[in-house]
Amino acid sequence: MSLVLALETSCDETSAAVVADGRLVRSSLIASQVDIHCRYGGVVPEVAARRHLEAFLPVVDQALAEAGVDPAELDALAVTVGPGLAGALVVGVAAASALALAWEKPLVTVNHIEAHAYAAFLEPADQPAGGADDGQTQQGEPCPPLVVLVVSGGHTSLAELRRHVEFRLLGETRDDAAGEAFDKVARHFGLGYPGGPVIDRLAAGGDPEAYALPRPMLDRDGLDFSFSGLKTAAINLSREAERRGEELKLPDLAASFQAAVIDVLIAKSFQALEQTGHRRLAVTGGVAANRALRQALAERAAAKGVELVMPAPRYCTDNAAMVAGMAHYLLAHTTLGSRLPLRVNPALSLGGRQRARGRRRAASTKPDLRTPWE
Ligand code: KG4
Ligand code: ZN
């Protein structure tokens, strides 16, 4: 058995969790900063870093207390080293390094996007996996080989997980991440931050066919995405309506925009299944909490005989349980050891590649080209 305590501070959630064997969540604590950042319509990096500093110790203490675990019982600590906001990552990495030194435990460094994929393997201790209460969608045993779609505010990545911790990137967004498009459309229409949950709720009362919006990249081969043009098309609808002297119906706009995103995500995911020959699909990341996406995926998977795994919504958005979960598999399947001091890697990509250009989360940071193990 392995018992891992993980810390996750890559964006605006300070999270700590204790997970047994990469699956069983003994505790999962999240101190969210959303109330602070929503005033600015997005995450303010400097504010996020300071808040992490204030929050991490109480969150770690509570995670250990709720799990009923003494630090001496831990097999390892784990921490997210990238991608994410540089200052926010530094706080988590410094905190985890200090705890690992003090408690004389190994420290496992985890890629945030890959950790999102490992949320698919979590099983909340209090509720049975796939139970109606926890909202997890799970058909069959979630294990590799599988195709995984990580769809969040910072990333939209399709990958193949052939064996544990061996990711092969199949496609990613060329511009905005899907969640980023949700956030920007919501901000334009004054709906608040984060935009995904608001659009999700509004769309439930709207007509997804009310407004014609593009389905970017569907006419092209390849598994890359692009959501910037779709976002602009949705925003432009308000200008066109204004010109015509009409009032835009926000629930219809939300439903039409959401339907376009969902169509693209599903089409590319099933194209990836066809290309790889795998019959199992995991969909994770903040946007995977979207109710219409979950329903549409479940229907398509059932029709195509594909096993679908979607974490409970609370494990789709950022959390440390997924980081602790992945750390178990890294300990079991790699010989990589981390030496202190660790370096953060704000522009890390799924599969470990460095991004060519910094995107949303790395807009003002120079990538650190050394991996933590060098
Ligand atoms: O995974 P996450 O917590 O952080 C990142 O790694 O980015 O994802 C946050 C993103 C935000 O863009 C948010 O608007 C989106 O996930 N999101 C949703 C929903 N809940 C969160 N998007 C659509 N529908 C939702 N229900
Ligand atoms: Zn995330």
Image (cartoon, grey):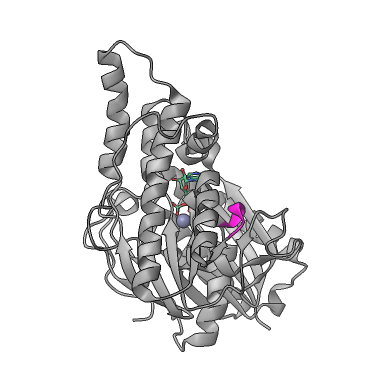
Predominant SS of the magenta segment: helix
* Res. 106 image quadrant: bottom right
The residue sitting at 74% across, 72% down in the picture is 70
Which residue is at the front of the view, 54 or 42?
42
Does the stretch in magenta take in 207? no
Can I make out residue 31 in this image? yes
Tell me what residue is drawn at x 55 percent, y 45 percent. Answer: 291
What span is colored magenta in the figure?
A: 311-315
Q: Residue at x 35, y 61 (%)?
A: 346
Q: Residue at x 44, y 75 (%)?
A: 278
In the image, taking residue 276 as reference, residue 309 lies left or right, namely right
Looking at the image, is 221 positioned above or below residue 186? Answer: below
Residue 140 at x, y percent in the picture? 61, 72
In the rendered image, the vertical position of residue 49 relative to residue 99, given as above or below: above
x and y percent of residue 47 in the render?
A: 45, 43
The residue at the far front in this view is 303
